[in-house]
Image (cartoon, rainbow, N blue to C red):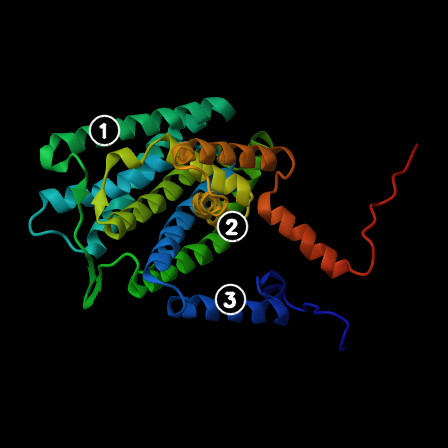
Amino acid sequence: MPGSGHFKSTYQADIAIFNTPFRRFWLIAFIAVLLALPLFVSDLQLYYVNHLILFSIAALMLNLLTGYAGLISLGHAAFLGAGVFTVAAMVVHIDPVPPFWLTVPAAGVVGTLLGALAGLPALRLRAVYLILSTVAILFAVQLGLASYQSGLGLEYLSGISIPDARLGPLVLSNPGSPEWYYFLLAVAAAATIFSVNLVRSRVGRAWMAIRDRDIAAQAIGVNLGYYKVLAFAFTSGVTAMVGGLYAYFAHLADAGEFDIWMGIFFIAMVIIGGMGSILGSFLGAIVVELLPHILDWSFEAVGVPGRLVTYFAAVEFAVFGLLIAFFLILEPEGLVGMWRRIKNYFELWPLKYMKAPTTTR
């Protein structure tokens, strides 16, 4: 009946993500905009977009680990660096140089093993103790990568050069090219679709049960040890594969890039976007990636003196800290929570939103 809403008569229709014509229309419009984006931006702007897509996938994996499984980690950058240097090691030590389609899965295997090792402390540690253990893993991996890089010789002090990625006749050379954009867009779409279905599966429900109350989850039959290690292993493996892609994207492997600050940036993406939300991973990554450029443009527009621009890094970290504190205290659900309230307002307009009356005994 027209105007009566969209009712579901089957289970498949009820669990569909884009279950209304309105949502399907905007999905098609969004895909069309993404496909046409390289036609309207420069190579430099497309480079920033490609960089954003790569880090969005890594932030998505951290959100699965922290937002869905409830396992907080500050060592996410370690798995990204492990993937980068797995590719670098294979390029340096194997002759002939292995192809792109072999080195990136190898990085995923290394990341999975490292993630399983990092997940072992989660069997006994919680909260701040688990955070400290992931930080220790990050420092250990960073020290190992730096030692490996410096041990290769003086010519590698500024990083290890990575050749172009080749997929048959396709050569991914310029990081600001449309070829890289469409390739990374396809990878991000596959990772998003898989993650959406994963959190709705048995594994995702087990992770959320552990996040909400692990004792109750164990009481109903959830194997805590298995699912905790699985969360670390899976997210670390995919993150390491993203690191392998990043090595070819940047054409460089530098151990100094994967430090504690990168781990904090990933945590900021999850907190600002919204923990426990697939969409929040991308929204948070957009804010964190664009914030330095917004601050830079603001400095130029205001006409900040050159000697004050030297404090740009300190201002950037201060803004990050304020944003994290704001969302943790005032908006725990992140940008996704703000979007839900805005959406609910327009769905209920012109009716006023009223809280349920409280009852007294």
Q: Which residue carries the number 3 mark?
A: 30
Name the residue furthest left.
95
Image position, residue 22 (x, y; %): 63, 69
Tell which tag, 2 or 1, sits nearer the viewer. Answer: 2
Image position, residue 104 (x, y; %): 25, 50
* Depth check, front residue: 136 or 39: 39
Could you tell me if the residues under marks 1 and 3 are in contact, i.e. CB atoms within 8 Å? no
Q: Amino acid at mark 1?
A: Gly
Name the mark on residue 144.
Answer: 1
* Depth check, front residue: 282 or 12: 282
Residue 183 left/right relative to 173? right
Name the mark on residue 222.
Answer: none
The quadrant holding residue 89 is top left
Q: Is residue 355 visible?
A: yes
Q: Earlier in the sequence, mark 2 or mark 1?
A: 1
Image position, residue 36 (x, y; %): 42, 70
Residue 149 left/right relative to 311? left
Image position, residue 111 (x, y; %): 30, 40
Q: Amino acid at mark 3?
A: Phe
Residue neighbourhood size for the residue with mark 3, other residues' Cα within 10 Å, grouped as few (<14), some (14–19), many (≥20)? few
Q: Amino acid at mark 2?
A: Leu
Q: Earlier in the sequence, mark 2 or mark 3?
A: 3
Residue lying at 59% horizontally and 43% vertically, measured from the top left: 334
Residue 26 left/right relative to 140? right
Name the residue furthest bottom.
2
Q: Quadrant of the N terminus?
A: bottom right
Q: Which residue carries the number 2 mark?
A: 283
Q: Quadrant of the C terminus?
A: top right
* Depth check, front residue: 74 or 230: 74
